[in-house]
Amino acid sequence: MARMKFICDAERCIECNSCVTACKNEHEVPWGVNRRRVVTINDGVIGQEKSISVACMHCSDAPCMAVCPVDCFYRTDEGVVLHDKDICIGCGYCSYACPFGAPQFPSNGTFGLRGKMDKCTFCAGGPEADGSHAEFEKYGRNRLAEGKLPACAEMCSTKALLGGDGDVVADIFRNRVLRRGKGSEVWGWGTAYGRAPNANATAPMPAPAPAPAPAATKTSAGAKS
Amino acid sequence: MMRVALMMAAMLALSACGEREQTLAASRNKSPDQPWQGAKNEFVAKNWTPSDKAGWETQLRNRAQTQNEYNKTN
């Protein structure tokens, strides 16, 4: 089994938030914690509004795992990044490290006490026995062990959010993009390196190297250091 | 007899000098369960048999293809 991944199609997402609702309902996520959320840019600008659904991306080289001082994260054989709430101390380092804002911290009480981290589990539960009540209480449902995919992706009305084996969802998305009459400008090399849609166009030239600084500046910089 | 008693006393006295395992990693607490072994509840999907790894992988592949609406329209 290859790596489990999410991908969200910004051309299809209609900001209905059903993925958010499905996640909260499936896992009975507490008030104030959003394992998944919809981010919209250019909100209200006609023709330019784009939305994507964001949660833990289950990174192959996850920065949260790298910074956790108590090493509470682990990765399953399916490439799902999970954590152990019995080890987590709720320090919040993972929240600073994560580029997607996935780690969430329940807060309650008079002083807004911060609890243990909670995040998307790709509906794969936690360290407890699969499908057990203890697992549900801490991490929510374990749909992978039930032979199902994450609720958010399966519930998506426009199929903007795809979840599952990375190869399978990538094929679905690639096929979709090709049928739209698009090519590398929205998928693959063009997206990563900025190649123009025109196949005959040349790759953008690298920016010219900056001119060497005057000797006087160098001296003063050296004097300061 | 005295020698044995001395050895036991020495072992007891030195027992505190050992080093405890200090590794704190989630993998130590991780359940040995694999998802293809199936969840222990009544919500398991009907199209595969728990403990059948190949069946579980096929089930997830088929399930992922339900997200491909071109399969429905063509």
Image: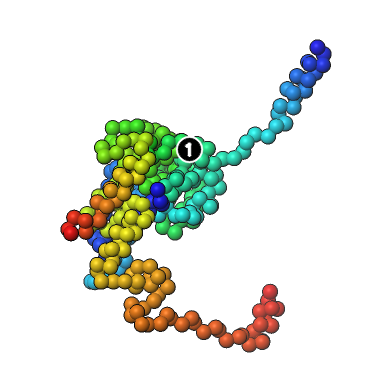
In the image, A215 versus A179, the foreground residue is A179
Image check: A148 left or right of A113?
A: left
In the orientation shown, which residue stands out farthest toward the top?
Answer: B1
Can the viewer see residue A140 in this picture? no
In the orientation shown, which residue stands out farthest toward the left?
Answer: B73
In the image, B53 versus A220, the foreground residue is B53
Image check: B60 left or right of A16?
A: right
* Residue located beneath label 1 in the image: B30
Image check: A200 left or right of B11?
A: left
Can the viewer see residue B55 in this picture? yes
- Disc 1 marks a residue whose amino acid type is Lys
**Image height of A137 relative to A57, above or below:** above
Residue at the spot x=39%, y=76% of the render? A195
**Image height of A37 relative to A133, above or below:** below
**Helix, strand or loop at mark 1:** loop
Q: Tell me residue A23's x, y (percent).
A: 30, 47
Specify the color scheme: rainbow
Q: Tell me residue B35's x, y (percent).
A: 38, 40
Q: Quadrant of residue B47?
A: top left
- Chain letter of mark 1 equals B
Q: Tell me residue B60's x, y (percent).
A: 32, 46
Residue at the spot x=24%, y=67% of the render? A179
Q: Tell me residue A95's x, y (percent).
A: 46, 53
**Image height of A90 relative to A63, above or below:** above
Image check: A134 left or right of B18?
A: left
